[in-house]
Image (cartoon, rainbow, N blue to C red):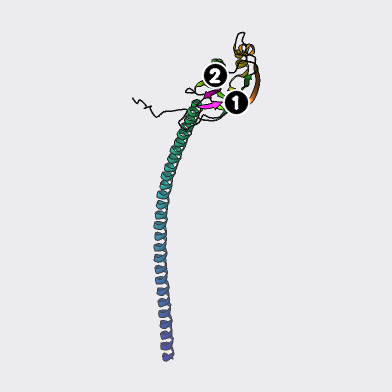
Amino acid sequence: MKAFKTMALTLVCLLLGIAIAWQYSSVNENLVLAQYEKKNLSQLVEELLMERNNNENLRARIEELQQEVDALKNDENMDMKYVEDLKKSVLMARVMAGLETVKGTGLVITVESGGQIKVKASHIQELLNELKASDVQALSVNDERIVATSEVREAGDYIMINGRQLVPPYTIKAIGDPDRMERSLRLMGGVLAKYQVYEFNVTLEKSDNVVIPAVRDDGTVIRTDKLTPVTQ
């Protein structure tokens, strides 16, 4: 009986020891797990804050780059506008100098001798002067563009314009207000009245598409080799 009690007590102590050991192990594991979870949570918070800071820095950098891009676009637009304005100015200067083929509404006048009097350079020059007085914007004779340096002169049986010999019939093209130019030419005692006395054959046609070629840009008509710009 005493041996049985001793064995039972021993068994109870053993079971109690096992239970205490298991409980300690469980508590220790829970503490380790809690510390691990706490450590992971801390790291996650730290990493989250770091990523947030990186995102803020990245967003700020993106904004800076966008501002630089916008500035470059504005500069590019300004440069392009300047270039386009410059191109227009150069083109207009070339048009005014007669270096570009032009078209517009105007008159096409053909003149040739019909009697004993031949058409001379002075007759053509008088016609051109009358057209210029009516605010014509472009002129040509037999497709020779009339510019500031153009000469109209006699050369034997020919008329010389821009260094070229022209033969009749003489076709004068004029871009401008066709009605105004016609009224100027038909004035009493005007150019066409004189042509009638000279028995010239004259045709006058209004057109919405008068094409006048550019003057030769080879240095024979417009010469600038002796000119030096004066800068302030």
Task: Point out residue 50 in the picture as x, y percentages from the top left corner.
Answer: 39, 55
Q: Earlier in the sequence, mark 2 or mark 1?
A: 1
186 on left or right of 144:
right
Q: Residue furthest top?
A: 188
Which amino acid type is shown beneath numbered disc 1?
Gly
Q: Is residue 15 placed above or below 150 in the rendered structure?
A: below
Q: Can you tell which mark lies on residue 197?
A: none
Q: If the image is split into quadrants, where does the N terminus sit?
A: bottom left
Is 15 in front, or is 179? 179
Residue bearing the label numbered 1: 104
Seen from the viewer's position, the closer of residues 61 and 72 is 72
Position of 47 compared to 124: left or right? Answer: left
Q: Secondary structure under badge 2?
A: helix
User: Which is nearer the eye, 210 or 87?
Assistant: 210
Q: Is residue 48 magenta?
A: no
Q: Residue at x 40, y 54 (%)?
A: 49
Extent of the magenta region: 157-168
- Which element type, helix, strand or loop, lies under badge 1? strand
- Confirm or deny contact between disc 2 and disc 1 (CB under 8 A): no
Residue at the location (41% across, 88% down)?
A: 6
Mark sitting on residue 121 = 2
Residue 127, quarter of picture: top right
